[in-house]
Image (cartoon, grey):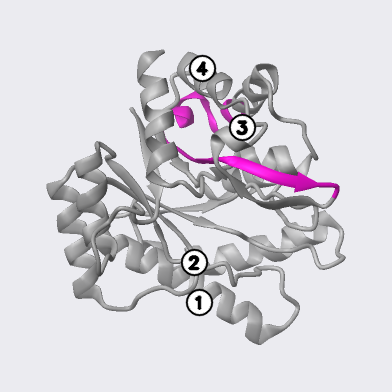
Amino acid sequence: MLHFAVAGCPHSTPAPGGTVAGIKRAHALGIHAMEIEWVQNVPGDPERMVEIRKTAEEHDTYLTVHAPYYVNLNSPEPAKLAASKGRVLKALAMGEIAGVRSVCVHAAFYLGLEPAKAYDNIKRAITDILKKKDVLFPHVNLALETMGKPSQFGTMEEVLKISKEFGIYPCIDPAHLHARSNGAVNTKKEWEEMFDLYAKILGKKSLKTMHMHFSGIAYGPKGEKHHLPLEESDARWKDFLKVMKDYDIGGTLVSESPLLEEDTLRMQRAYAKL
């Protein structure tokens, strides 16, 4: 089954807001999935996480998390590397208590290194993080995201290869791939090739439990600039939904449009008509 998720609390969530209220508001709108945005910091109150889990279960809501932006698993500075691993680990551990399925992570910048060397550094960092999986986050997936700038670790091939090595699955963002390539990855054929590659490396069954993002996006020669509403972008989003339907993709598709619930519902309704 494919769940259409809103990225954070809907704009129309009543004050004072918060994840619990956001889940309830999304449910009232007919949205049954949410990506919790811990992009600045990860909360540390387990009781609050239990409340989130109970609310999601009561409202049949599928949860994912976006980990903090301040992560670089390729940092040459020991303190920054340790802090990055700590932020990812905390997001995974709190996500476990909250009943989250998958945690999206912006893994790293290349920092002038050859991609292969950066890959090795990131692999070592992930090895350290996953040592705690059985104890702290046995049911949560670590999803390294495809990224929108050529300066960032996160090509389709990189995230699939490293995910295969660890038995995890990535977060695929076609908008980022579109921006990273300065305008490619925006046709049915390219999306079919994307899903074919995913299935080839992680297995056909993996298409049933994907973690994906989608939105319009502004970009240039250096890649991603910022996200855009679907209708204000060049994204052929209806074609993308058709490909997802043809491949019977399952899991969650998070709308990262600035319009939040409006574009989440736009895609959900369009998909339902296919």
Amino acid type of the residue that numbered disc 1 sits on in the rendered structure: Gly
User: What is the residue that sits farthest to the bottom in this orientation?
Assistant: 79
Disc 4 versus disc 3: nearer the observer: 4
Q: Earlier in the sequence, mark 2 or mark 4?
A: 2
The label shown at residue 218 is none
Vertical order, 82 against 104 (above or below): below
Amino acid type of the residue that numbered disc 3 sits on in the rendered structure: Ile
Disc 1 versus disc 2: nearer the observer: 2
Left or right of 194? Residue 62 is left
| CA–CA distance in space, label 4 to label 3 | 23 Å
Q: Which residues are magenta?
A: 198-221
Q: Tell me what residue is drawn at x 64 percent, y 47 percent.
A: 146
Rendering coords of residue 157 (x, y %): 71, 40
Amino acid type of the residue that numbered disc 2 sits on in the rendered structure: Val
Q: Mark 2–mark 4 contact, CB under 8 Å?
A: no
Q: Earlier in the sequence, mark 4 or mark 3?
A: 3
Q: For mark 1, does the 10 Å Cα neighbourhood hold few (<14), some (14 to 19), or many (20 or more) residues?
A: some
Residue linked to disc 3: 201
* Magenta-drawn stretch contains 179: no
Q: Tell me what residue is drawn at x 75 percent, y 78 percent.
A: 76
Residue linked to disc 2: 39
Question: Under tag 1, what secondary structure?
Answer: helix
Amino acid type of the residue that numbered disc 4 sits on in the rendered structure: Lys
Rendering coords of residue 128 (x, y %): 55, 69
Residue linked to disc 1: 86
